[in-house]
Amino acid sequence: MGDYPIPELEGQTVLEFARTPNMDFVAQHGLLGQVQTIPESLPPGSDVANLSILGYDPRLYYTGRAPLEAASIGVDLAPSDVAFRCNLVTLEDGKMRDFSAGHISTEEARPFIQELEAHLGSREFQFFCGTSYRHLMVWRGGQDKIFCTPPHDISGQPVAPHLPSGGEGAGRVLDLMLHSQALLKDHPLNQQRQAAGKPPVSSIWLWGQGRRPQLPSFQEKYEKSGAMISAVDLLKGIGRILGLDIIQVPGATGYLDTNYVGKADYALAALWEHDLVYVHVEAPDEAGHNGDLKAKIQAVEDFDRLVVGTILNKISKFPLVRIMILPDHLTPISAQTHTRESVPVAIFPRNGKGEADKVTKKKRKFSEREAQGSGVFFPEGHKLMEFFLRRSE
């Protein structure tokens, strides 16, 4: 949700401009502040940020994005294996036209992954189907010291300067990508997509590599049970590794058409069984990557109305509950990728034990500017969860 001031919005951010009465309520009646979810030494990715929010210092535990997604789709990694995120992308005239191949559906993507496994798979390299455009390649006994660029970082840019490089094994990874382009160029599935006005899947893009991480479970670390609700394999993978209950919500897509109300209702139901429920919504991030201001405003307003609003309307049945709302990172419309600035966070206690901050709460919004002026700042994001869980016990 986080963003920079936008000229088309008269210098407001999306959060300042959007109608968000429910998040504003939480900011007005609870604690508002900032948190640094991305350590200076690590890239500003959803993997790093969500590990921080869940209370795990990514400087100690982060090994890469793909092994977290491997856990989500049930792919076992030996200590010598390296997992790579495998995007289905659309390249055109040597540029990254679309890092998601038109947000291809999982049903449309599966035959492409099966085709890649049939022609490029081996005992050494294996392809696994994930969700939408987000899939997995595992290099058994592979190399991980390779520089790979996230495809959403180079939308509309020439890809040549961003191909895998450096380190032993970069040539093997690049070779797979080039072979995928030859395989897919005139494939009947792409002919069908183009006839339907959809962008073709013209290449795989390998990135986010890493080996299996070793993390203590959430129960071990905090002595509390938890559940994860997300449409994104990365988040479900993190949840699985941490021993969280992964709750599948029908119609959850990771995009603008996701089942917002379903996520809220399933979260409320899960609270009867768990101490913590972590609800992740991807739509604002996708809109940011696409540089689509209208879609991002819609995603933020839908999240506020259908997720936060539903939860606030039904939460009173629980005798003691706390709500925390925050973006994992900024995905500014102007940058179309993740950035490392701190993000706003609001915590709403319903136990009568609130904290004070410097801001007059009467009409304030849940926004970057208001959070910055609050005087509350968590410089180490991985310490936020401890504060959230323990602060009034």
Image: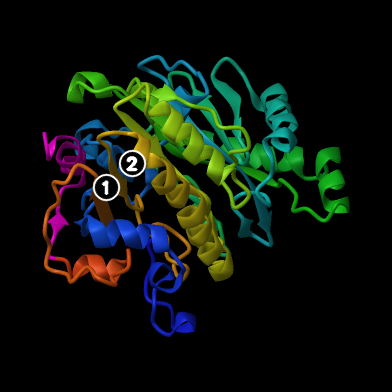
The residue lying at 15 percent from left, 52 percent from top is 378
* Magenta-colored stretch includes residue 50: no
In which image quadrant can residue 82 be found? Answer: top left
Q: Is residue 340 visible?
A: no
Three-letter residue code for mark 1: Leu
Local crowd size for mark 2, using a 10 Å CA cut-off: few (<14), some (14–19), many (≥20): many
**Which-is-in-front pick, marks 1 and 2?**
2
Label annotation for residue 50: 2
Where's residue 302, x and y in %?
53, 56
From the viewer's side, name the closer residue of 72 and 320: 320
From the viewer's side, name the closer residue of 317 and 384: 317
Measured in 3D between alpha carbons, the distance from the residue under mark 1 to the one under mark 2, in whole angstroms, is 13 Å
Q: Give the residues in magenta.
A: 375-393
Identify the element where label 2 is drawn.
Answer: helix
The residue lying at 13 percent from left, 46 percent from top is 353
The residue singled out by tag 1 in the image is: 42
Where's residue 110, x and y in %?
70, 30
Q: The N terminus appears in which quarter of the rendering?
A: bottom left
Q: Is residue 214 left or right of residue 161?
A: left
Three-letter residue code for mark 2: Asn
In the rendered image, the vertical position of residue 213 relative to residue 359, given as above or below = above
Compare marks 1 and 2 and give the one earlier in the sequence.
1
The residue lying at 37 percent from left, 29 percent from top is 271
